[in-house]
Amino acid sequence: MAKRITLRIPWNLLVTLVAYYLFSEMYVKLVVPTFNWGGMTYDPRDNGIVELALLVFTSLLLPNKVKNPCDLYNWLYFVILLIPSAVLSAEQGSNRFHLLLMFAALWLLMLFRRIFAGVFYRRIIAHPMNYRHLPYQSVFLYILGVLIFLAVSVHGAFNLNFYKVYEFRFDISENMPLVFQYMLPLAAITLIGYLAALTYHRKNTKILFLIAVIGILFFGFSSNKSMLFYPLVAMAGYFLFKMSRPHLLILGGFSILAKITLLLPEGGSNLLGALFANRIVFIPSHINYFYFDFFSNNPKMLWAESKISLGLITSELPMGVMKYIGGLMTGNYDFSSNTGWVANAYMNAGIIGIVIYAAIIGYIFSLIDFWAKIYGKQLVGAAFLIPVITLIMSADLLIVLLTTGLIFLLMIFQVTTRGIFIHKNDGFRNERIGAPHNA
């Protein structure tokens, strides 16, 4: 009897191509004529074969099902950065070699993650109650303490108006004590995401609501609008990690938003276009290209602005790199153009920098995937989601590690896991000692 042939639909590829073509239409019809931020132009290539080939190859390389947190993290890099970058290469004529470097960075990261997962094999002690060993109340109290200190330091000044954030934000940052400049992002960015994920895992709805309110308060007192969304992002992340193919939902959601943006009348499309099409989809990739272009023709930074250089290397730029790039792009040198890990890696050390950063992030991803097997994919994946998105879109690896506190979150999981292993080993040893001996 002949075997029945099952036809499998390549959903990853199909949804990727739909998103690519809708993003292209959105860029040509809305983003360039309406916003034109930082010198965006419409200068299409004769064909987009290279861009399509890179997208098709990478979509086939990425996993069909999300079995580990890093699977979704890699899809996010693909959706947030690579698809818009491919559109800019095809429709704006952005440098194809720099596009290739962005894709190669993801391929390297995936390779390093697999290497580290294989070389540093770790014994797994899985138990549904392992999450109870993770710190909870102490983290909650720390976040509350930082929030209270923030409210006192700004003398109760409270702003929830998105259009007025820059009237307060820079004054607040400049007058903030140095220690608090590290305490605030640790609490309001990294730990609040961890706390939201852990609370979701504990199924405590009331505390989840309180965490969402704390996010609103952090935004109101700091005028940093991103802090409003961090708890919600972690909660959404927990929900996504329950699914086997969350990347299809994200790609489909982005595609639907793109179509809605194009169909809305002018006023509505401008509002959604500014927030979604311009700010989320294309500006991060456009800034990435600018960093690549600038540092291809100028000396690399070699971490001159980082404390790891110990002041031995000085920058040749007349001001901080983010403000200088922002000034070149917009004409306003008070504007900071921040970017994610791949452009920062190239800025500091070129292709070697990309390889170094990909190796470090690959190792971090291997740790996260290991912890996911101990505490649960949803919990661990959501706990690290905010630092990972920050890495992709808006900050250098060292800033995410040291300033926003990713290294502290890594230490929480490492120390807790080590404690579980010691406890389990001691229990096994005591069981062996107490066992009766046969004569």
Image (cartoon, helix red, strand yellow):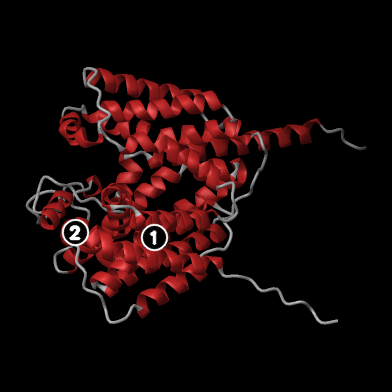
Q: Is residue 212 visible?
A: yes
Circle 1 sits on which residue? 358
Up/down of 48 relative to 355, above or below: below
Mark carried by residue 3: none
Residue most extreme to the front? 265
Is residue 108 found left or right of 119 in the rendered image? left
Binning the other alpha carbons within 10 Å of mark 2 as few (below 14), some (14 to 19) or many (20 upward) gives: some
Of 343 and 64, the residue lying toward us: 64
What amino acid type should be assigned to the residue bearing mark 2?
A: Asn
What amino acid type should be assigned to the residue bearing mark 1?
A: Ala
Binning the other alpha carbons within 10 Å of mark 1 as few (below 14), some (14 to 19) or many (20 upward) gives: many
Residue placed at 54% from the left, 35% from the top?
Answer: 416
Circle 2 sits on which residue? 36
Residue 3 sits in which quadrant?
bottom right
In the rendered image, residue 126, in percent from the top left (x then y), is placed at 66, 43
Residue most extreme to the left? 318
In the rendered image, residue 231, in percent from the top left (x then y), is placed at 43, 35
Residue placed at 32% from the left, 48% from the top?
Answer: 272
From mark 2 to mark 1, how far is it between C-alphas? 32 Å
Of 360 and 3, the residue lying toward us: 3
Quarter of the image where the N terminus is located: bottom right
Tag 1 secondary structure: helix
Tag 2 secondary structure: loop
Quarter of the image where the C terminus is located: top right
**Mark 2 or 1: the one toward you:** 2
In the rendered image, residue 353, in percent from the top left (x then y), is placed at 30, 62
Is residue 143 found left or right of 296 in the rendered image? right
Q: Is residue 189 visible?
A: no
